[in-house]
Amino acid sequence: MTITQQTLLECLEYIDGKLYWKKPTSVSTKVGQEAGCNNNGYRLLKLNKQFIQTHRAIFLMHYGFLPEIVDHIDGNKLNCRRNNLMVGVTDAKSTSKRTKILPAELKDKILPFENG
């Protein structure tokens, strides 16, 4: 089962770049507890027996879709504030995932969302 925007919004609350459980999804999760753990510099959480990086979950919660690459504008993997996330595009001439922010393409996809 794929993790959807609806599932994320039902189970998690976004506050200032972090996700907190709104309802327990396993015996190890508690309401109000920060979701996930650190893994290779990224925050990673488990939902419906699937893992998703926190920055990707926040992007999906906010925009309603999940691109192949979600990148951090400032390069800080733990700064998952939604205004620090961008769609990444792989440059055919390089292996770098860091590219320009694409706000014009995302503008019509923004959904109502609270808390910065």
Image: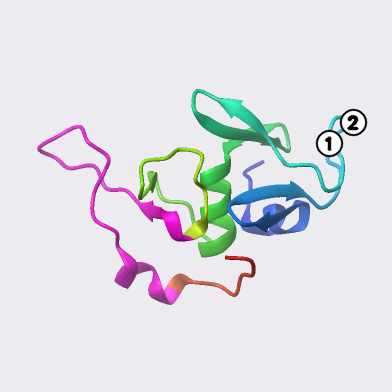
Quadrant in the picture for the N terminus: top right
Q: Nearer the viewer, residue 94 or 31?
A: 31
Q: 48 above or below 110? A: above
The type of residue carrying mark 1 is Thr
Badge 2, how many Cα within 10 Å: few under 14, some, many 20+? few
The type of residue carrying mark 2 is Val
Residue named by callout 2: 27
Q: 112 above or below 93? A: below
Residue 96 magenta-drawn? Answer: yes
Q: Are marks 1 and 2 in contact (CB under 8 Å)?
A: yes
Residue 54 picture quarter:
top right
Determine whether the residue tagged by mark 2 lies in a helix, strand or loop: loop
Percent of width and height locating residue 7:
71, 53
Q: Is residue 37 left or right of residue 103?
A: right
Residue found at the very far right of the displayed protein = 27
Inter-mark Cα distance, 1 to 2:
6 Å
Q: Residue at x 86, y 47 (%)?
A: 31
Q: Residue at x 50, y 23 (%)?
A: 40
Badge 1, how many Cα within 10 Å: few under 14, some, many 20+? some
Magenta span of residues: 83-108
Quadrant in the picture for the C terminus: bottom right
Residue named by callout 1: 29
Percent of width and height locating residue 69:
38, 44
Please say which color scheme the image uses: rainbow
